[in-house]
């Protein structure tokens, strides 16, 4: 069903032309010849958008707009002004108009303005829907497991602290970018820019120019002065994704800027204050990278002011059902589907999977399944082939332990195996984690839990 647009203008030719153009665009269109007629049509027809002429007899457009904003703050309105009526348009915008056209206007311009305003309205409604339906979590991050509650507690503390540097660690696909955006959107710098750069995307020479900017003539192609991300993010947050991939030469330049809180453009001689907070993210073990000589120890400690670990999905399996439902609702809207949920067998397999690609992999599985699903409930047979296999990937087919008749204390077994693994490898956490078949983050969680540090 097409969206309904109300066109209110007392000039018949303008009203007719605009209505015909909008009908050609595929909209359902109704007309009003004056302000009173406009308000009545809005109450009876509930249009998705109103084109409103400001200068009309009986009840002018400004009065209509004031009444609308008292009754319905969400109804989008595009005002139409006479030539030279920019001041009126500005006043209408202040009262809540979503856009304006100045007579005489091009009908294609009206079409584009209608599409822009309606797209923005759809986005606002989707955001409102997601916020109202979203499972327990923090911002766009879904989860209610103990591991995620600890993460959310840390993020809530950062809402009131202007931390100069934050280091996010975790495997690929865990949602470190969402955590970085949550730090920005709820922190003291939320009204300032959020800029991001993937440290794997550019060679070192271009990376320096991208971060610090360059002066005109600094190198062959530098035909104009360029502001870098450090300047563009002034007052806000610069997100350095995959900081562990940064070349050593660039690490030194970044450290100098963070230490001195100032920098210079490439080819420049003037110092520029560094007024951006830094959130860095990595899927590498930076301590191990320091030991291997691939990451500067001084930069590591400079970034390690507020360390935050984002847990792998296999370490919070109890969050899988909420994530699955979140993605089902998301892709139902994207693909106009009506998938109702997941069968018990399918959910059991989804929760039992090791998810090496973490939340990103789960998202892709649900998206692919919904696109191809011939019915409205996801069953085990609908999942991708690797998940339908009898034994989930990463789980051994035989168990090396035999459960005694009297049972065991699972906590004690967990502690004992953790201690044995650490003792066997002389305390090397990465090696101990490999022996146990878990991530380093899961091992560190157990070490803290059992007091083994």
Image (cartoon, helix red, strand yellow):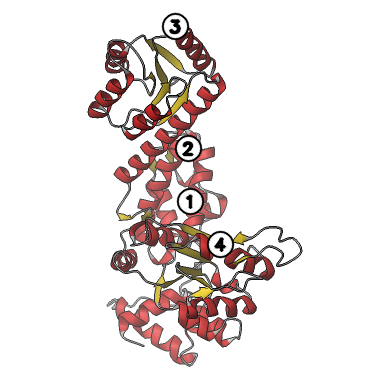
What residue sits 51% from the left and 47% below the top? 383
Residue under label 1: 363
| Tag shown at residue 334 | 2
User: What kind of element bears circle 3?
Assistant: helix
Where on the picture, by quarter, is residue 137?
A: bottom left
Residue under label 4: 197
Asked if the residue under mark 3 is in contact with the one under mark 4, i.e. CB atoms within 8 Å, the reply is no
Q: Quadrant of the N terminus?
A: top left
Asked if the residue under mark 1 is in contact with the one under mark 4, i.e. CB atoms within 8 Å, the reply is no
Can you name the residue that lies furthest to the top here?
A: 12
| Tag shown at residue 12 | 3
Asked if the residue under mark 2 is in contact with the one under mark 1, i.e. CB atoms within 8 Å, the reply is no
* Disc 2 crowd, CA 10 A, few/some/many (<14, 14-19, 20+): few
Mark 4 or 3: the one toward you:
3
Mark 3 or 2: the one toward you:
3
Q: Earlier in the sequence, mark 1 or mark 2?
A: 2
How far is disc 4 from disc 3 in space, using C-alphas? 53 Å
Can residue 379 be seen here? The reply is: yes
Asked if the residue under mark 1 is in contact with the one under mark 3, i.e. CB atoms within 8 Å, the reply is no
Q: Position of residue 56 (x, y in %)?
A: 34, 13
What residue sits 39% from the left and 28% below the top? 89
Q: Position of residue 243 (x, y in %)?
A: 55, 71
How far is disc 4 from disc 1 in space, using C-alphas? 23 Å
How far is disc 2 from disc 4 in space, using C-alphas? 28 Å
Q: Earlier in the sequence, mark 4 or mark 3?
A: 3
How far is disc 1 from disc 2 in space, using C-alphas? 13 Å
């Amino acid at each position: 069903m097409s969206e309904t647009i109300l066109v209110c203008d007392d000039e018949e030719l303008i009203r007719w032309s605009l209505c015909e153009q909008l009908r050609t665009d595929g909209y359902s269109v109704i007309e009003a010849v004056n302000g009173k007629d406009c308000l009545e049509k809005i109450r009876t027809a509930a249009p998705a958008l109103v084109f409103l002429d400001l200068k009309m007899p009986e009840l002018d457009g400004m009065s209509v707009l004031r009444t609308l904003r008292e009754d319905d703050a969400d109804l989008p309105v595009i005002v139409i002004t006479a030539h030279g009526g920019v001041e009126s348009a500005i006043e209408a915008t202040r009262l809540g108009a979503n856009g304006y056209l100045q007579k005489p206007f091009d009908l294609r311009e009206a079409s584009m303005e209608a599409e822009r305003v309606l797209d923005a309205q759809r986005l606002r409604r989707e955001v409102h829907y997601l916020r109202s339906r979203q499972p327990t979590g923090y911002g766009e991050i879904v989860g209610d497991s103990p591991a995620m509650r600890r993460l959310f507690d840390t993020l809530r503390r950062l809402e009131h602290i202007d931390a100069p540097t934050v280091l996010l660690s975790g495997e690929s696909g865990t949602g470190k970018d969402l955590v970085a955006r949550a730090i920005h959107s709820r922190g003291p710098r939320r009204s300032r820019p959020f800029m991001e750069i993937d440290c794997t995307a550019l060679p070192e020479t271009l990376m320096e120019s991208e971060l610090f900017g360059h002066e005109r003539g600094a190198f062959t192609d530098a035909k104009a002065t360029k502001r870098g991300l450090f300047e563009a993010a002034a007052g806000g947050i610069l997100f350095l994704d995959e900081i562990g991939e940064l070349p050593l030469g660039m690490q030194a330049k970044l450290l100098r800027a963070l230490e001195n809180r100032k920098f210079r453009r490439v080819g420049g001689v003037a110092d520029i204050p560094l007024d951006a907070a830094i959130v860095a993210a990595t899927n590498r073990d930076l301590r191990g990278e320091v030991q291997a000589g691939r990451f500067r120890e001084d930069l590591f400690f400079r970034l390690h002011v507020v360390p935050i670990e984002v847990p792998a999905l296999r370490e919070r399996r109890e969050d899988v059902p909420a994530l699955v439902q979140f993605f089902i609702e998301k892709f139902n809207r994207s693909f106009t589907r009506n998938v109702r949920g997941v069968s018990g067998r399918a959910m059991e397999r989804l929760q039992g999977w090791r998810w090496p690609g973490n939340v990103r992999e789960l998202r892709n599985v649900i998206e692919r399944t919904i696109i191809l699903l011939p019915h409205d409930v996801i069953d085990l047979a609908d999942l991708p082939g690797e998940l339908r296999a009898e034994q989930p990937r990463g789980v051994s087919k035989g168990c090396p332990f035999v459960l005694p008749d009297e049972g065991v204390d699972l906590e004690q077994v967990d502690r004992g195996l953790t201690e044995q693994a650490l003792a066997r490898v002389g305390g090397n956490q990465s090696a101990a984690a490999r022996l146990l078949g878990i991530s380093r983050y899961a091992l560190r969680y157990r070490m803290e839990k059992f007091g083994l540090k």
